[in-house]
Image (cartoon, helix red, strand yellow):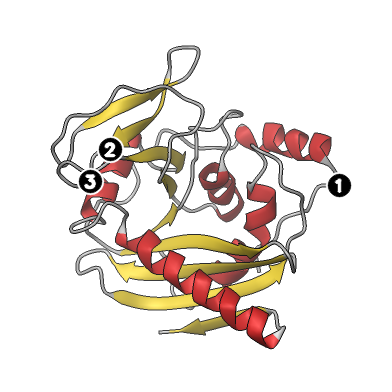
Amino acid sequence: MTSVHTPADEAEARAVQDELRSRVVFDEPGPPPGQGLVAGVDVAYDDERDLVAAAAVVLDAATLDVVEQATAVGRVSFPYVPGLLAFRELPTVLAALDALTVTPDLVVCDGYGLAHPRRFGLACHLGVVTGRPVMGVAKNPFTFTCAEPGPARGDASALVAEDGSEVGRALRTQDGIKPVYVSVGHRISLDNACAHALALSPRFRIPETTRHADALCRRALRAAVGHGASGTSSQP
């Protein structure tokens, strides 16, 4: 089982990010869009009970049919600190991924990778820890500036950091609908990540991977709250 160490405090968490950041691989293109298996991961919280539920849903990239899905529920083990959210989410996300019986070729996070104040968001952290290609597709912009992309599906504009570097893209996945924000996590190029985001979003703004994982983790959290239980589950 893949596991991560929970830092004792913010300083240790930032030190972990600094150490792992050097392991991110940016020079691989990643798997081709529309082929193989793509997993979406997402989490839901019950702050009153300190519970977090994670879901991993694997889709056939060619048909977007669900191949397998798994959930995990655990206790929140790290406080909310902007820029350090991965430490709250990773343990349960990893438990959900470990509960799968298939190995996805790509993992899509509902969040950021390189487009992160410390250049090491959840998608980067998850990629380094698992060794798998990972990308981030966020619903909202973070701390970077970007021009409004064109109105048509596939139009994109750069997410630009203070030093002028491109850390991601605002991508229009549906005509006339607000964009999503794509960034590299690990072992995938930005061009390819955007192509995957489009391939996974044939009808809606949000990729099908995220749509399925979002619904599943919410159901898992409701069930856990109702039963007062934690653990993992997997089903085809």
Foreground of the two, 164 or 141: 141
Q: Which residue is mark 1?
A: 8
Q: Which residue is mark 2?
A: 171
- Where residue 206 sits: x, y (%)? 32, 54
Q: Residue furthest right?
A: 8
Residue type of the residue flagged with mark 3? Thr
Q: Tell me which residue sits at (48%, 46%) in the image.
A: 111
Residue type of the residue flagged with mark 1? Ala
Picture quadrant where residue 107 is located: bottom left
How far is the residue under mark 2 from the one under mark 3? Answer: 6 Å
Q: Nearer the viewer, mark 1 or mark 3?
A: 3
Q: Residue furthest top?
A: 163
Question: Under tag 1, what secondary structure?
Answer: loop
Q: From what the image shows, is residue 198 above or below residue 172?
A: below
Please give the count of numbered marks on the rendered protein.
3
Q: Tell me which residue sits at (74%, 64%) in the image.
A: 50
Q: Which residue is mark 3?
A: 173
Picture quadrant where residue 209 is located: bottom left
Question: Under tag 2, what secondary structure?
Answer: strand
